[in-house]
Image: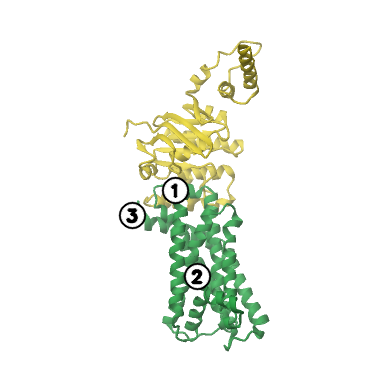
Chain colours: A green, B yellow
């Protein structure tokens, strides 16, 4: 049955992608919060924030992109939870198909949906004056990091979706993740924060990812940040994947 | 393989912590027959269906479907079965046709579109086939659900309470679909809490009560369990409902007659002590 993994995953991914294209509201909802935050920070707070950069929208866009992903994956947990609530999940599991394909379809759909949301947010940022002279390899690196971050958080969302008891529980786990960029280098330089907060901000995953993307956008050397960022993403991905698979096997046997 | 019964269950037990849902269930379902598992809510019908469809592991006993053991070769069992669960397992956002095509793809069949169209036609859903399932009535959903279960012609189909929550008209639609299935040689195990449904559809009926099968037979055999109808002013055949409550009452249910019985026993005990 493992031989059908790709065919089954493709069929199931096609199904959940239809869910996305037929309920575009989930993508728009995902993009609305980051866009509103961007407007708020640029046109309300931005004037008072001293970052040492020419364009505040360019400065804070990396953090906004991470907030977009953190709010997008809440829908992955939601969709998985709803599948389990309806009989659809049990129908799939009682069929001779690849069982891990059922999860992978949700994961691939999550990546696709988040990419669409990211493109929308990026488009708004362009309208608001975001500019980057980044080269194609730098853009690909940004895309790679964003996809990796999405995958890592998606597996966390899978854990939440599989173990939640209520719909609210399935998406509530994402709130701390959405909040994390606020205590990082995303909106203000960490040097301006008091000691303990600064220590936290400089040693949590978002700061290294934000710094890396910002450096890539502004054509600065990325330095050691990119390795820390990759280590965080891969680390969360591995732990999240292992825990999600564990939760899945407990759930289906 | 062909000589083995479609479903064989021996001594199957399942508990959730202190709650003993199944306490040693035995039953055999012959190929090509409709077998109704009758029982009240919480009797363990769904638990048994989940074990047979490889979604749940039994704590004890053995069960085989199409001659294949469900615990040791669940993958092969899944090749032979289809489950129509208690809640219509249809994707609301997809159209009826897309639901059918998805299942055909997952069963690795050629030309999913043609398979979908044929089933839409067979279940009188052709006109609605392109609409989102969210707009379907309860009966249409159930019919689509059953149609999805038929893709790939599995020899054994489980229908868990196929008509619960349906209006009378939709129930009859589903009954017709089930009768049609059995006419084509598919084995159907259906659970129900509606006595008339078992009476209408099933070749054999088993009553699951407090985790055990307490009666198993044809409708005629079940009716023979009660004394023949007494001739009064009105002649009245015992309905299956009468049989159900009579049988359930005998084995210590909590209806009025059994409480009275307990009272008598208690009285006897006292008198022997004294």
Q: Specify whether residue B184 is in view.
A: no
- Asked if both marks, 3 and 1, belong to the same chain, the answer given is yes
Res. A93 mark: 1
Task: Point out the image quarter for the C terminus of chain B.
Answer: top right
Q: Specify whether residue B11 is in view.
A: yes
Crowd band around label 2 with a 10 angstrom C-alpha radius: few (<14), some (14–19), many (20+) = many
Crowd band around label 1 with a 10 angstrom C-alpha radius: few (<14), some (14–19), many (20+) = some
Res. A115 mark: 2
- The residue to which callout 3 is attached is A3
* Chain on which label 2 sits: A
Give the quadrant of residue B269. top right
Q: Residue furthest right?
A: A44
Q: Name the residue nearer the viewer: A212 or B235.
A: A212
* Chain on which label 1 sits: A
Real-space CA distance between mark 2 and mark 1, rounded to the nearest whole angstrom: 29 Å
Left or right for B181, reference A192: left
Say whether disc 3 or disc 1 marks the residue closer to the N-terminus: 3
- Asked if both marks, 2 and 1, belong to the same chain, the answer given is yes
* Chain on which label 3 sits: A
Secondary structure found at label 1: helix
| Residue A33: image location, x then y, percent | 62, 70
Q: Are marks 2 and 1 in contact (CB under 8 Å)?
A: no
Real-space CA distance between mark 3 and mark 1, rounded to the nearest whole angstrom: 16 Å
Secondary structure found at label 3: helix
| Residue A181: image location, x then y, percent | 57, 73
Say which residue appears at 53% left-offset and 56% top-offset: A161
Q: Name the residue nearer the viewer: A40 or A196.
A: A196
- Asked if both marks, 2 and 3, belong to the same chain, the answer given is yes
């Amino acid at each position: 049955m493992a031989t059908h993994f790709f065919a089954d995953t493709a069929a199931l991914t096609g199904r959940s992608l239809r869910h996305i294209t037929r309920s575009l509201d989930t993508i728009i909802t995902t993009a609305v919060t980051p866009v509103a935050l961007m407007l708020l920070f640029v046109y309300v707070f931005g004037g008072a924030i001293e970052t040492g950069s020419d364009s505040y929208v360019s400065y804070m866009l990396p953090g906004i992109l991470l907030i977009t992903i953190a709010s997008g994956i809440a829908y992955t947990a939601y969709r998985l939870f709803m599948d389990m609530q309806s009989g659809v999940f049990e129908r799939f599991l009682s069929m001779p198909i690849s069982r891990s394909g059922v999860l992978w379809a949700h994961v691939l759909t999550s990546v696709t949906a988040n990419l669409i949301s990211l493109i929308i947010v990026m488009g708004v940022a362009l309208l608001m004056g975001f500019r980057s002279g980044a080269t194609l390899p730098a853009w690909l690196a940004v895309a790679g990091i964003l996809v990796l971050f999405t995958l890592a958080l998606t597996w966390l969302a899978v854990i939440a979706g599989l173990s939640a008891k209520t719909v609210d529980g399935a998406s509530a786990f994402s709130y701390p993740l959405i909040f994390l960029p606020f205590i990082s280098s995303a909106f203000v330089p960490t040097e301006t924060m008091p000691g303990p907060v600064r220590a936290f901000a400089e040693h949590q995953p978002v700061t290294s990812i934000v710094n890396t993307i910002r450096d890539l956008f502004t054509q600065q050397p990325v330095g050691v940040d990119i390795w820390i960022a990759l280590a965080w993403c891969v680390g969360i991905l591995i732990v999240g994947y292992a825990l999600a698979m564990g939760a899945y096997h407990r759930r289906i046997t | 393989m062909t000589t083995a019964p479609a479903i064989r269950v021996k001594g199957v037990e399942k508990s959730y912590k202190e709650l003993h849902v199944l306490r040693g269930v035995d039953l055999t379902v012959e190929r090509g027959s409709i077998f109704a598992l009758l029982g009240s809510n919480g009797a363990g019908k769904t638990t048994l269906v989940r074990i047979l469809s490889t979604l749940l592991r039994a704590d004890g006993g053995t069960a085989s479907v199409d001659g294949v053991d469900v615990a040791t070769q669940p993958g092969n069992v899944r090749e032979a079965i289809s489950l129509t669960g208690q809640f219509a397992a249809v994707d609301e956002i997809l159209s009826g046709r897309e639901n059918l095509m998805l299942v055909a793809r997952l069963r690795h069949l050629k030309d999913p579109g043609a398979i979908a169209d044929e089933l839409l036609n067979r279940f009188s859903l052709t006109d609605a086939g392109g609409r989102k399932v969210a707009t379907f009535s309860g009966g249409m959903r159930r019919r689509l659900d059953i149609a999805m279960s038929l893709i790939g012609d599995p020899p054994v189909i489980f229908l868990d309470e196929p008509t619960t929550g349906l209006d009378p008209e939709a129930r009859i639609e589903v009954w017709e679909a089930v009768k049609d299935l059995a006419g084509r040689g598919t084995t159907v195990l259906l659970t129900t809490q509606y006595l008339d449904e078992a009476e209408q559809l099933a070749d054999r009926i088993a009553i699951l009560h407090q985790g055990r099968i307490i009666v198993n037979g044809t409708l005629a055999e079940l009716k023979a369990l009660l004394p023949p109808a007494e001739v009064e002013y009105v002649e009245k055949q015992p309905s299956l409902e009468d049989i159900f409550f009579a049988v359930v009452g005998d084995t210590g249910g909590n209806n009025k007659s059994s409480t009275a019985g307990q009272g008598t026993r208690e009285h006897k005990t006292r008198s022997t002590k004294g």
